[in-house]
């Protein structure tokens, strides 16, 4: 059985070090600006930090995949190009890109640079993936979290590049790279600014009847009873009413985390080359715990054994877990 | 000397909703006969399950629109995953009889090099992307609705340099997200595969209201839209001055002929922007207007003229 690469989140230099030390084959990270899709306060890397972190990762035989996966608005492309230039200078192992203009710039300027297609490019068919492979030399695609395992296997047979899939963490509901819900409510764009549900516009309001409402830019996204853990207000995880649902319901998805721990052997068999753990916004201790657990699991599977991952439940913050779209088409 | 409004035309985007065949026939008949619209985009962009319902009526509708002097462009699906969606996209992109507007990279792959338009779902946000698309056969680009107005001029200039025409949405609910999952079916406790086409009951989308009773979003099958109607009536003169010649109206369940007449008068300079905005407000009574995306504010907001920082022209 081919061993799949374990790709881990690094929101900070400390998280990067923890992920590498815990056995990550590769880490993904970006600069502290709009050029990457986790542009949150307190996260990401200055140029100096990036350079030092790449050196650290390489000293431990881990790769660094640089996230350059947002879309420059017209008039502002220079920031993305400068980020690519620095990434090449620091020796990152690949760029994770979504925008065709950014992909074109790197492919033309640095023909030896390796390109991965971000989930933000929303390439969900063999034809779309081949478009990016043939035109920009993309070597790996990060698949949207909307495909079943048989569908992944079928895509694998029809594309000339590697496949990376998310296996653990936050479960995006919308087609990534095609969602402007946050911009609609807050004025900050996921695609252009790298921001989803910005913390500066989040607040929790105590309401009558011992309730707490979680709000984004003044909109009530969900409501919790006293003692219940109040979730973070993300529009696609919110509770609303509709004409047929006056009681209020999770219109898009229950608040659940993705956990494909029990599907790892099937995913490997389907031809997945790399497993991605979500969570650049997570603490270094979370990253260390999750990466260690999955390192052990993948090594156990490679050795022909069964992986025990039940204890990962405690890391999902008491949330229900889902295998999402991967298990059955009925998810749709 | 040419007037700056020369060559400006209104376009009508595809109907996003699952309107019945009869409703669509009637709608397009009126558009053909009465609306001052230059180009009409036709086709199912949101849900491949809906497509067969209108296919039968398509030839007659196309014929009617052409007799009314409209240019007809066929639009492809925004989300392409299933075999039937891949086949439909490839077939549309390989035909030679009609101009097409592509909304997914699978379509770009099938079209490779032959002329086509770039739809609003294609994320053509910047100069390099537009130039690349032009080098691959694109002749026309519709900017993403969330692109700030400050970027319109640079995008239009890049398009023009690469030989493309530029289009921007000026009216209708903003498309905010698509998913693999059908939220209309989910609201009715069904799956996408057994949805029984409940979306047909919501010709202007299904409202989602916050737990505090605030109207927030609209569901249209796999698509999520704004509760507000994006309306750039107040910005149309600036948009034209930035070199954008095609102004897109999205079909809503209101008097679209009257909406088109209002925007036409505005684009010709026969109606002042604020008067046009008032008129649109009357035609869409009960729905809030928004222009936040253009002003790089929350998309749902309406930024009044006195509060605007003037965008560069």
Image (cartoon, rainbow, N blue to C red):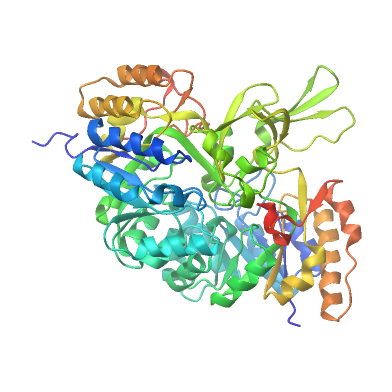
- Front residue of B110 and A207: B110
- Front residue of A73 and B283: B283
Q: Is residue B156 left or right of residue A78?
A: left
Whole-percent x, y for residue A231 in the image: 78, 37
Q: Is residue A173 left or right of residue A226?
A: left
Q: Residue furthest left?
A: B1
Whole-percent x, y for residue B136 in the image: 33, 64
Residue at position x 44%, y 61% in the image: B88
Whole-percent x, y for residue B297 in the image: 50, 31
Quadrant of the snapshot with the N terminus of chain A:
bottom right
- Front residue of B309 and B192: B192
Whole-percent x, y for residue A9 in the image: 72, 59
Up the image or down, B18 lies above or below B207; here it is below
Residue at position x 75%, y 79% in the image: A3
Up the image or down, B302 lies above or below A85; here it is above
Q: Is residue B148 left or right of residue B186?
A: left
Q: Is residue A312 visible?
A: yes
């Amino acid at each position: 059985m081919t061993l799949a690469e374990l790709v881990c989140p690094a929101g900070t230099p400390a998280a990067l070090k923890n992920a590498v030390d815990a056995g990550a084959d590769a880490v993904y990270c970006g600069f502290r600006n709009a050029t990457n899709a986790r542009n949150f306060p307190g996260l990401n890397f200055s140029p100096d930090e990036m350079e030092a972190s790449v050196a650290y990762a390489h000293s431990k035989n881990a790769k660094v995949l640089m996230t350059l996966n947002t879309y420059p608005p017209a008039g502002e492309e220079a920031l993305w190009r400068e980020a690519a230039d620095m990434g090449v200078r620091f020796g990152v192992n690949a760029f994770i890109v979504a925008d065709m203009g950014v992909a074109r710039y790197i492919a033309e300027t640095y023909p030896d640079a390796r390109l991965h297609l971000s989930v933000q490019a929303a390439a969900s068919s063999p034809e779309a993936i081949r478009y990016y492979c043939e035109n920009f030399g993309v070597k790996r695609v990060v698949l949207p979290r909307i495909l079943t395992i048989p569908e992944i296997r079928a895509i694998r047979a029809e594309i000339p590049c590697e496949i990376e899939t998310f296996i653990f963490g936050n479960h995006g509901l919308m087609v990534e790279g095609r969602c402007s819900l946050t911009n609609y409510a807050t004025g900050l764009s996921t695609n252009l600014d790298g921001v989803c549900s910005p913390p500066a516009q989040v607040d929790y309001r105590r309401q009558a009847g011992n309730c707490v409402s979680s709000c984004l830019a003044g909109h009530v996204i969900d409501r919790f009873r006293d003692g219940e853990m109040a979730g973070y207000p993300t529009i696609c995880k919110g509770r609303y009413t509709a004409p047929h649902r006056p009681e209020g319901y999770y219109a898009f998805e229950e608040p659940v985390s993705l956990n494909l721990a029990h599907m790892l052997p099937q995913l490997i068999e389907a031809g997945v080359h790399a497993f991605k753990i979500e969570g650049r916004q997570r603490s270094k201790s979370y990253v260390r715990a999750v990466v260690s657990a999955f390192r052990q699991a993948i090594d156990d599977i490679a050795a022909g054994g069964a992986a025990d991952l039940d204890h990962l439940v405690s890391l999902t913050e008491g949330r229900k877990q889902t295998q999402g779209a991967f298990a059955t088409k009925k998810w749709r | 000397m040419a007037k700056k409004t020369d060559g400006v035309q209104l376009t009508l985007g595809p109907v996003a909703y699952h309107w019945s065949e009869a409703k669509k026939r009637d709608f397009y008949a009126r558009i053909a006969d009465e609306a001052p619209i230059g180009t009409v985009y036709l086709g199912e962009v949101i849900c491949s399950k809906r497509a067969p319902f209108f296919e039968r009526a398509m030839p007659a509708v196309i014929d009617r629109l052409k007799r009314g002097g409209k240019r007809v462009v066929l639009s492809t699906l925004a989300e392409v995953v299933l075999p039937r969606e891949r086949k439909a996209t490839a077939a549309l992109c390989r035909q030679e009889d009609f101009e097409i507007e592509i909304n997914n990279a699978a379509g770009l792959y099938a079209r490779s090099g032959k002329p086509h338009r770039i739809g609003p779902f294609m994320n053509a946000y910047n100069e390099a992307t537009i130039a690349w698309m032009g080098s691959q056969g694109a002749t026309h680009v519709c900017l993403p609705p969330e692109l700030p107005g400050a970027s319109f001029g640079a995008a239009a200039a890049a398009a023009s340099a690469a030989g493309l025409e530029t289009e921007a949405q000026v009216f209708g609910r903003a498309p905010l997200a698509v998913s693999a999952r059908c939220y209309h079916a989910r609201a009715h406790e069904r799956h996408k595969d057994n949805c029984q086409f409940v979306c047909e009951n919501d010709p202007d989308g299904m409202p989602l209201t916050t737990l505090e009773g605030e109207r927030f979003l609209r569901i249209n099958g796999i698509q999520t839209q704004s509760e507000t109607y994006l309306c750039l009536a107040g910005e149309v003169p600036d948009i034209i001055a930035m070199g954008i010649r095609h102004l897109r109206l999205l079909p809503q369940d209101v008097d679209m002929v009257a909406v088109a007449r209002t925007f036409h008068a505005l684009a010709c300079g026969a109606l002042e922007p604020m008067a046009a905005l008032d008129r649109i407000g009357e035609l869409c009574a009960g729905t809030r207007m928004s222009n936040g995306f253009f002003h790089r504010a929350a998309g749902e907001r309406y930024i009044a003229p006195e509060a605007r920082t003037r965008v560069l022209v």
